[in-house]
Image (cartoon, rainbow, N blue to C red):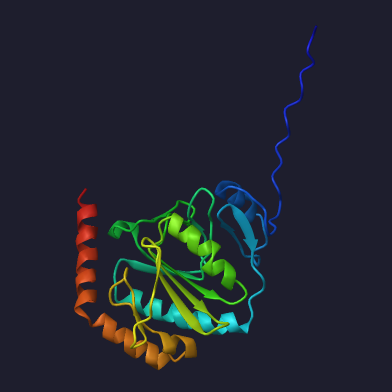
Amino acid sequence: MSTIPRPSPTFYEPTELHNGDRMTQEEFHRVYEKMPEHVKAELIGGIVYVASPLGLPHGRTDPALISVMFMYCGRTPGVEVCSNTTVKLGRKSEPQPDTFLRVLPEYGGQSRTTDDEYVEGAPELVAEVAHSSRSIDLGAKRTDYARNGVREYIVLSVVDQKVFWFDLPQDRELPIPEDGILRSLTFPGLWIDVQGLLSRDAARLMTTLEKGLASPEHAAFVSKLEEDRQRLAAK
């Protein structure tokens, strides 16, 4: 009895992204590259999240956080700050954090820059400004960042005017010290005045940051980064 061969199943790949779609990082990236530039979407734990339009509460707050990190990088060779940049984080993860800090690969960082100018691997520190995305930022994203090697996580919640700070390898939320200054675990000298951040007080933020940049911990960190750069260059 002859057997009639069945046709091979046709491969179907979606042409756009929708909330709740499930896919791998590679599938997500191929589709995302075809989407209009104004669309922001992320893959978190294998699930697609398409962002809502961003309003003034988010837009007013984001620059304060980025500014502090930008000034920190200017005094810390080997550290880079990025805003709204796609990160190929893992097999089921491709987020687009509001802000992240990373140690550059030539200085011993844990992420790398791909040939097509994306970041692959976990930045050392990620920060999100949470408004409509609050539940995702404090839930699925926190889990995904921890799973894929992000060390430190900051969430500025616009709704309740609070900063959440996490040591992800230890799976713990860190309390903000009584003096109100968040001193980064991963980037010594990155001192963030929490009230200054919430009130968008540039002078207060810069005054606090300058104290951090003048600390012995920051000087030691800069020296270590340069030593790591020289060691890697000699290989």
The residue lying at 30 percent from left, 57 percent from top is 106
Q: Which quadrant is the N terminus positioned in?
A: top right
Q: Position of residue 161 (x, y in %)?
A: 52, 85
Residue 76 sits in quarter? bottom left
Q: Position of residue 19 (x, y in %)?
A: 68, 59
Q: Position of residue 210 (x, y in %)?
A: 29, 86
Number of marks in picture: 0
**Is 4 left, or right, of 12 in this rendering?**
right
Is residue 33 visible in the rendered image? The answer is no
**Is 47 left, or right, of 183 in this rendering?**
right
Of residues 5 and 171, which is closer to you in this image? 171
The residue lying at 39 percent from left, 76 percent from top is 69
View extreme (top): residue = 1
Q: Where is 22 relative to 160, above or below?
A: above
Q: Where is 135 relative to 117, above or below?
A: below
Q: Where is 146 relative to 69, above or below?
A: above
The residue lying at 70 percent from left, 55 percent from top is 16
Residue 226 sits in quarter? bottom left
Is residue 51 visible in the rendered image? The answer is yes
The residue lying at 51 percent from left, 71 percent from top is 98
Q: Position of residue 200 (x, y in %)?
A: 48, 89
